Amino acid sequence: MKPNDHTSIPAGATLHLRRALATDHAALADLWKRSVLATHHFLTPLAVDELYTALLQEYLPGVEELWLAEYGQSTAEMADAPTPGTDSVKTGKDAKPSADFPRPVGFMGFNWPQIEMLFVEPEFFGHGIGKTLLALTQKRAIAEVATLTLDVNEQNPAALAFYARMGFAVTGRSPVDGQGRPYPLLHMAWRQP
């Protein structure tokens, strides 16, 4: 499939947001790898493989909340989008993966108020999925008068530009990533307008 070719989305499908289940982790890790290979050209193949393993074993199970976006049929409106920190999800507390489009198209994990990860399937870049996921945390931050924080690789200008468009500002820099590798991180923060 070519980037931004959405012919595989069922007609009339809407974007659903739900808490990820442990059974979603393998699909999310695979999505992560495709997204990283499309955007993190500075990572070596070995680093990608090591991070993939850590994602499955530590990072996905270790975040307080893990949300995913998927397409499916629904009468629910996006105005009823869930708020992180609650069990109020579009398809119910015990939501199951969509049978109409049985794979996630994006996901976000955080340890409140730090956004730890936000990744979108490359074929869906530029179609509002990352923005929709990020809006979940911004909605909660406004309600709690909190400041959202995140780290982004300095060598990933597309992600840096995305977060800047979403109102995040650079607050600092680290010369290495969280694993001590020579991939500088920019620390960013978002405060309600």
Image (cartoon, helix red, strand yellow):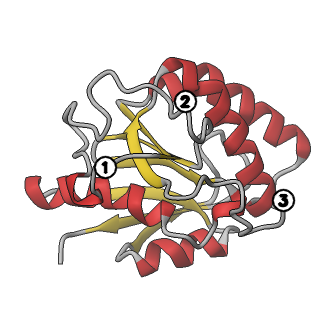
Q: Which residue is drawn at 68% across and 43% down?
A: 31
Whole-number angstrom distance, CA of label 3 to CA of label 1: 28 Å
Q: Residues within 10 Å of mark 3 (few under 14, many from 20)?
A: few
- Quarter of the image for residue 20 reads top left
Q: How crowded is mark 1: few (under 14 residues within 10 Å), some or many (20 or more)?
A: few
Mark 3 or 1: in front is 1
Give, as a three-letter code, the residue at label 3. Answer: Met
Identify the residue at the far right of this view.
45
**Element under disc 1:** loop
Give, as a three-letter code, the residue at label 2. Answer: Tyr
Q: Where is residue 90 in the image (x, y as percent from the top left)?
A: 29, 41
User: Which of the two labelled residues, at mark 3 and mark 1, occupies the earlier sequence position?
Assistant: 3
User: Which of the two labelled residues, at mark 1 and mark 2, occupies the earlier sequence position?
Assistant: 2
On the image, numbered disc 1 is attached to which residue? Answer: 75
Q: Is residue 163 above or below residue 96?
A: below
Q: Residue at x 28, y 49 (%)?
A: 76
Q: Residues within 10 Å of mark 2 (few under 14, many from 20)?
A: some
On the image, numbered disc 3 is attached to which residue? Answer: 1
On the image, numbered disc 2 is attached to which residue? Answer: 59
